[in-house]
Image: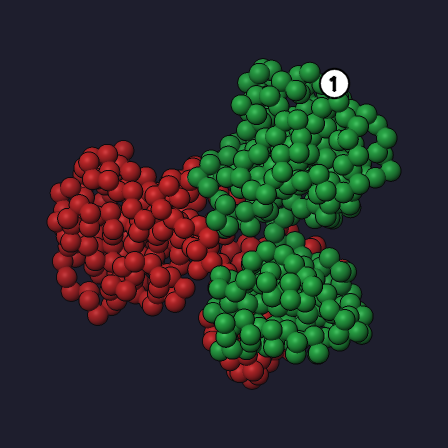
Chain colours: A red, B green
Amino acid sequence: MEKNDFVRSVFDSSSIALITHVNPDGDAIGSSIALKHALEKMGKLVDVYCQDDIPDIFKFLEGVDRIKKADDLTKNYDLAVALDCSDRERMGTCSSVMDRADRSANIDHHVSNTFYANINVVDENASATGEIVFELVGLLDNSTNINMASKAIAVAIYTAIATDTGRFSFSNTSPKTHRIVASLIEWGVDVDRLSNLLFKSHSFEWVKLLGLVINTLEMYRDGKVAIMHISQEMMDKAGAAEEETGGIIQYAKDIYGVELAAVLREIDPSTTKVGLRSESLVDVSALAQEFGGGGHKRAAGYTIELPITQAQVSLMEAIDMHFEE
Amino acid sequence: MEKNDFVRSVFDSSSIALITHVNPDGDAIGSSIALKHALEKMGKLVDVYCQDDIPDIFKFLEGVDRIKKADDLTKNYDLAVALDCSDRERMGTCSSVMDRADRSANIDHHVSNTFYANINVVDENASATGEIVFELVGLLDNSTNINMASKAIAVAIYTAIATDTGRFSFSNTSPKTHRIVASLIEWGVDVDRLSNLLFKSHSFEWVKLLGLVINTLEMYRDGKVAIMHISQEMMDKAGAAEEETGGIIQYAKDIYGVELAAVLREIDPSTTKVGLRSESLVDVSALAQEFGGGGHKRAAGYTIELPITQAQVSLMEAIDMHFEE
């Protein structure tokens, strides 16, 4: 229903803005780029907006270099479409593009979506917004006789789905997800090359940092708790950038038997940022809230005005309380 | 054609032996266990044979504890089926079970298969032997009115396919692969749980070893060559077992720009085992052959009677020759 409304709205529009969320991930960028290519095949004037920089790893996507930022926010569009944004705020400064557009649409898969647009194509059973975009592209194909099966669209949707499902490993990965990916390969995705780009490309600095951080690994509570830390000295030694600290916590969490993993990152000698992950038992958002932070049950964090060593002591005390409850 | 012959042969047999290859991997074990479950649903007496131990990581598969070894090789079967074996030798000592059986079949996806059985179900376009077993199970379902859609079969085939495609990332991953996986999820695979078991479960010892080995990482030839080593001291410090050294070379190969990765493993103070991986340019099997080893273009190895440091010097000299060609 809403999908058909979306298609009609596209037909009624000449200029279309696509807007995705701050700190864009693979689904944000992939779903936006895919829809951009499809709409351009229909002769629409399309711009993609994102408040923040596109991570280097996604720079290979065709058209990603033309994504606009906050300094281009004065244009008016017939239709503005938010992608992968559960609410208006997720668009950051770019929400003003939607405010000024004649009509608005919202394509998303988050269960928390607030239905903030004129047309809301929300499917919380979709593994990724890219999965919904695949279905919309199919509808556009049917209603236009334009063949939408292009490699550029397929690569972008594959990027969206493969990243948001953690390489087809999260519980959101459905039979439909795999059937869509089968079609994307038929549309021309080079699985080997794309997987290399998305999942097997680490910087030398990241690998060096990983080694240094693993050497700090400590286990507590009969192997249920794994804690590592990242000092500024390690960052300098590895020559690593801040964004390269991200995936390292996974190595503590993936140890067999670990229920709670923490990485303590030295921001300055008296400030520590703490990342927390939980396997299933512990609600780490409750733990983070005790220190003024937040997050989800399985991933949370906080910043504390203590050097690493003392931050670790206070964290361990809080963890002990949680495990004894 | 051959698939129908296989089905007929199953109908004509009461006792069936399934045999897979030495050093069994996920496809060997998963495809054998899946076929075992399907044949048992038909009331057949089925035994699975494997010369070597089953890696711990696959112990969760239902029925894996009843796989027989070399000491059970005296039974006679109506039909013996080799799975994932490109030739008779791949069965190791268990090939004698096939020698004594009334009929033989060979289910495999290797292009090098030698068609050594009475019935040869060989499909080199299949991503895994598990993919062929899925199709055979479908044929058995059709010809018996027995519903083969069981969780145990699905989990075993998923294990076969997900491991042999490197989590759906190798070029052997086809549209058909993804459509089969879609069906397996419908049959009851818990994707999140199974992915955790197969890909996100590391021992504490493995992670410790990874950290120590990464600290030895050295880059050569403008970042095209990455070399790491594993001393016995590191193994002892981490408390790691030999089979835990396997996946570590990937961390050198996955560094952006690396064309050739090598890991040198100290076997004893005067013997070094060298593992080689190539991204695309270098034929590492040619390199390994120079030292009396072998393998494939992209993965090869050899053992050399030299301490690690000298083994690394001789390797670097050989690499220099290959890059200058």
Instruction: Answer few, some or many: residues within 10 Å of disc 1's Cα (few below 14, many 20 plus, some between 14 and 19).
Output: some
Above or below for B92 versus B202: above
Quarter of the N terminus of chain A within the rendering = top left
**Residue B5 coordinates in the image, percent (x, y):** 60, 21
Q: Residue at x 26, y 42 (%)?
A: A148
Q: Chain of mark 1?
A: B
Q: Residue at x 15, y 64 (%)?
A: A74
Q: Residue at x 16, y 57 (%)?
A: A100
Horizontal side, residue A109 vs residue B205: left or right: left
Res A133 visible: yes
Q: Residue at x 54, y 71 (%)?
A: B322
Instruction: Give B204 or B259, whichever is nearer the viewer.
Output: B259
Horizontal side, residue B238 vs residue B284: left or right: right
Secondary element type, mark 1: loop
Above or below for A8 versus A272: above
Instruction: Give A72 or B90, whichever is nearer the viewer.
Output: B90
Instruction: Give A285 or A8, whichever is nearer the viewer.
Output: A8
**Residue A92 coordinates in the image, percent (x, y):** 31, 63
Name the residue that disc number 1 marks. Answer: B14
Quarter of the C terminus of chain A within the rendering = bottom right
